[in-house]
Image (tube, helix red, strand yellow):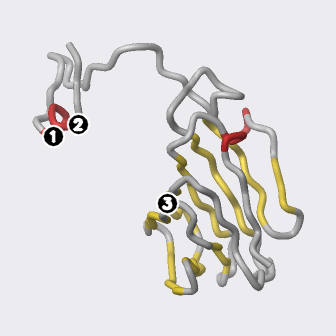
């Protein structure tokens, strides 16, 4: 059986109540991942990326912005659209000069080629799950406007 997004909305399920899927699932923990960093600004752990895992079509990871990290004058850009889902903390996101407060449970879709940055304004690390529609993190070319 194949399941599409349309099928999922109809809650196609097995007799055990689980949604059926094809292929092997891949499970990862942050602890499985190398810590990458822009020192003093953000640490991140790439969970799924075709250069590290047997996955394709999606790159996903967790980023953490420490308390007191300075807000950069400018953000960054890349061709791919990106989604942030905030796991903990409070802060704001600036997209193309428009600032919006964020907190645990918020999500933001950032169109490709949009200048953006997430800033921690709280008293605990600002943690977010990030998603790119790209096979690999190595496909993402970061551009830092001057």
Which residue appears at 27% of the width and 20% of the height? 20
Give the total number of marks visible in the rendering. Answer: 3
Residue bearing mark 3? 85
Residue sitting farthest toward the right: 39
Question: Is 5 on the left-hand or right-hand side of 36?
Answer: left
- Of residues 129 and 145, which is closer to you in this image? 145
Residue bearing mark 2? 5
Which residue appears at 54% of the width and 48% of the height? 132
Q: Secondary structure at mark 1?
A: helix
Badge 2 or badge 3: first in the primary sequence: 2
Q: Secondary structure at mark 3?
A: strand
Q: Cα distance, mark 1 to mark 3?
A: 22 Å
Question: Is 39 on the left-hand or right-hand side of 75?
Answer: right
- Of residues 35 and 77, which is closer to you in this image? 77
Find out whether the residues at labels 1 and 3 contact each other: C-beta distance under 8 Å. no
Density class for disc 3 (Cα within 10 Å; few <14, some 14-19, many ≥20) is some
Badge 1 or badge 3: first in the primary sequence: 1
Instruction: Assign the C terminus to one quadrant of the image.
Output: bottom right
Residue bearing mark 1? 9
> Picture quarter containing residue 16?
top left
Find out whether the residues at labels 2 and 1 contact each other: C-beta distance under 8 Å. yes
């Amino acid at each position: 059986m194949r399941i599409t997004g349309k099928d999922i909305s109809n809650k196609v399920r097995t007799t055990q109540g689980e949604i059926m899927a094809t292929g092997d699932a891949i499970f990862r923990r942050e602890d499985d991942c190398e810590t990458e960093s822009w020192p003093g600004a953000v640490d991140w752990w790439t969970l799924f990326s075709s250069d590290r895992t047997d996955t394709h079509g999606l790159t996903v990871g967790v980023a953490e912005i420490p308390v007191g990290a300075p807000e950069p004058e400018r953000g960054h850009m890349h061709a791919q659209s990106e989604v942030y889902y905030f796991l903990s903390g409070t802060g704001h996101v600036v997209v193309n000069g428009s600032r919006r407060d964020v907190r645990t449970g918020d999500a933001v879709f950032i169109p490709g080629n949009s200048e953006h940055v997430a800033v921690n304004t709280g008293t605990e690390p600002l943690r977010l799950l990030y998603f790119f529609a790209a096979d690999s993190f190595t496909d993402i070319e970061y551009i830092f406007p001057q």
